[in-house]
Amino acid sequence: MPERNSHAVELYRALSGPGAMPVPPGNRYYVPILEETPAKDPILRLRRHIQLAQSESVDLLTGFRGNGKTTQLLRLRADLEKSGCHVFMLDMLDHVLMTKPIELSDFVLSLMSALARVASEDSGLDLTARSYGRRLLDFLKSEVEVDGLEFGDETLVATKLSLKLKTEATFKEQVQERLRHRLTRLFEEARGFVSELVDAVRKRADDPNKHVVLLVDSLEQLRGVGSESQRMHESVVALFSGEAANLRWPKLHVVYTVPPYLLPLAANVGRNFGGHPVTVWPNIHVRTKTGEPDDRGVAIVQQIIEQRYSAWTGVLSPEQLQRLAVSSGGDIRDLFRLVRETALTLDIVQERNPKAKVTDDMLRDAEQQLRNELMPTSEQDMRWLEEIHRTRSVALPSDAELAALARFFDSNLVMNYQNGEPWYDVHPLLVSAIERRVAKGDEARGS
């Protein structure tokens, strides 16, 4: 049977593949979110921090996975380049094993290897990449005995090392162990490479004061899994709080993305990097603190969908899209999933009834599918999440629960918004279920 070409199919496809990927300004899918309110635009503030900084600087950027942070980094890159900066951007998903504890040694190796790789792709900077390959090769040969690393062409050493650190947990642990007492030389080589790289960029531009910027993306995805969760979270805090001085690089302006759980786990962490506040990219403000739809945020969501498929009203009514927008909590990834699954259900139903429309049952099914995956199981978690919903704050009972709070952020159970001041709430799809479970538990204990 030939494949149907319906609005449901086209909307599903429009929110998959390229349509679901982060996009820079100027892309046909790009939709401004906070640009029209400059005083409330955290990315504009971050850009000015970088532009006004002298010598080197470090800024931290956080945002929940799926809320459009990478798109904002692409916007930051474009704005900085327009102002005359040279910008390198790294996706550390390609270089870091995100679910295992991280130490300064393997992080620096991964970071410098990624930077060398990007520099080698930058026209005119091949010599600098080879320079780092030679530095790294000499360092590994003279200082470290690591099994499983074959030395070959110096231009490929960084690539090979980065790949093994990303994919092989045992190798990563071995590197951490061997380098714990050999960090001084590692830093010397890394700083020497960064200095050479900045000098090469400035020489090519014939501008001795040119700002060179490094945007380090995807580190917000460092997350704990299973029994190693606490160790993982502690390692991230140790890296960005305890080792802040070693994450600054000569003549380079760096923006590190960090997990949202870092903020409550490491109070005032921005102070360690020169005093700049941590830049927070919030979810789209699709709902108020009382849970009512926010018209401006819903309009942004509608524009995001319309940019990808202008005939979306052939599947959803504006009221139905508003419902899914609020149910997503302003998380773009969850929004796309809810709309896609609704479109898929409609497509299936239309096999027998071509005139079928989206019903409330279809919307509930898409919401329930996501709710089932989010729903916590322990009563303790339920009660804490209910308290977060009631107070619109993280409502941390004690420092002993920091690891559990990190897990809430990791799992998208708790979301961050910005409306004058930051506030938190549980994922909207969990609110009624959590309230019912807590009430049911109270009744059981009282009976």
Image: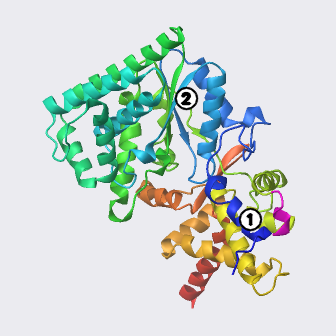
Secondary structure beneath label 1: helix
Q: Is residue 312 magenta?
A: yes
Q: Residue at x 58, y 47 (%)?
A: 63
Outermost residue to the bottom:
447
Nearer the observer, 289 or 59: 59
Boundaries of the magenta span: 310-315
Where's residue 234, x and y in %?
Answer: 36, 49
The correct choice, above or below, for 300 with respect to 217 in the image is: below
Q: Position of residue 97 (x, y in %)?
A: 36, 51
The one nearer the camera, 299 or 316, is 316
Task: Look at mark 2 in the image and give the residue it sits on.
Answer: 276
Q: CA distance from mark 1 to mark 2?
A: 44 Å
* Residue 11 appears left or right of 434: right
Number of other residues with Cα within 10 Å of mark 2, as a class: few under 14, some 14 to 19, many 20 or more: some
Q: Name the amino acid type tagged 1.
A: Glu
Q: Amino acid at mark 2?
A: His
Do the residues bearing badges 1 and 2 touch, measured as CB atoms within 8 Å?
A: no
Residue 221 locus on image (x, y percent): 47, 51
Residue 180 in view here: no
**The C terminus: image quadrant:** bottom right
Q: Nearer the viewer, mark 1 or mark 2?
A: 1
Q: How is the image coloured?
A: rainbow
Q: Is residue 120 left or right of residue 347?
A: left
Q: Is residue 400 magenta?
A: no
Q: Which mark is residue 10?
A: 1
Q: Is residue 40 left or right of residue 199?
A: right
Q: Residue at x 36, y 42 (%)?
A: 238
